Amino acid sequence: MAAVYMRRLGKELREIETEAPPAGLRLLKADDFDTWIFQIEVLGDSLYRGERFALKFRFDNTYPFSAPAVQFVVDSQMRAPVHPHVYTNGHICASILGEDWSPTLSVISVCITIQSMLASCKKKELPEGNDTYVRTAPDNPKKTHFVYDDDTV
Amino acid sequence: MKVVINRWHAIAQWQWDTGRTDEHGDTEEDVCGICRVPFEGCCPTCKMPGDDCPLIWGECSHVFHMHCLLKWIGTPASKQQCPMDRRPWVTAERKVSGS
């Protein structure tokens, strides 16, 4: 029998494949239940008009009782958005990915939250202490203890 | 004509009275918000639906498979809150159906 977390992810995947995902989101890769990648763009008026990003989800068997590890893909082709809550290594400081996670959230609801986090951005700037963080950050953003101090963006 | 019944199978249908379907007359998805399995199915760790895998109601009116909710409440990350509205989870008395 498939592990419990795979059954829940399988349901989410079937839903994404049968009903088109919300505007601006496209599933790029979901070959297994370890890593999924979405293309994400912000439609309408925003500082990120015309930009495309890739959002990577990593799951383990604690899903959905614990949040997936979510970050922007940073490689030879993709860059993370310049945003006060997004480090240049792709790590995202968002409370729903940490202490405000709930098992009723889903992959798509996380994508939508990240999309709206970008859409509401007023000024493209890097997070404070970006360089230091990126130098010392663990590979898995869930190992970082973020402090959520700003509810405005 | 004479009909003789040799054999018959009784078939019954059941569903949990979640108290939230008829009012709106809609086909509100009756799935557990945690595992996404219908209430009438069982949580992912059970094999048999029914009394062995019951539902649990919160005073906030949200319903889940009991096993799913207890698993969540058992994690420190839950802060003992309802996964839907983040209010402190208080299990409601099982209401007696009016119908």
Image (cartoon, coloured by chain):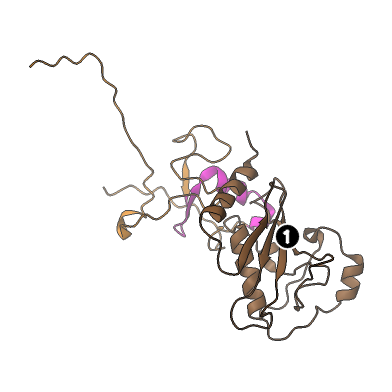
Q: Indicate the colour of chain B.
A: orange
Q: For the view shown, which residue lies furthest in the bottom direction?
A: A123
Q: Nearer the viewer, residue A100 or A15?
A: A15
Q: Residue at x 65, y 64 (%)?
A: A100
- Percent of width and height locating residue A76: 84, 66
Q: Nearer the viewer, residue B13 or A52?
A: A52
- Percent of width and height locating residue A57: 71, 57
Q: Quadrant of residue A70?
A: bottom right
Q: Quadrant of residue B9?
A: top left
Whether residue B40 is visible: yes
Q: Is residue B25 above or below residue A130?
A: above
Amino acid found under the numbered disc labelled 1: Lys
Q: Nearer the viewer, residue A71 or A14?
A: A14
Q: Which residues are magenta?
A: B57-79
Q: Residue at x 75, y 63 (%)?
A: A71
Q: Is residue A85 above or below residue A106?
A: below
Q: Using the image, name the chain to which the residue with label 1 belongs.
A: A
In the image, taking residue B25 as reference, residue B53 lies left or right, namely right
Q: Indicate the colour of chain A.
A: brown
Q: Residues within 10 Å of mark 1 (few under 14, many from 20)?
A: many
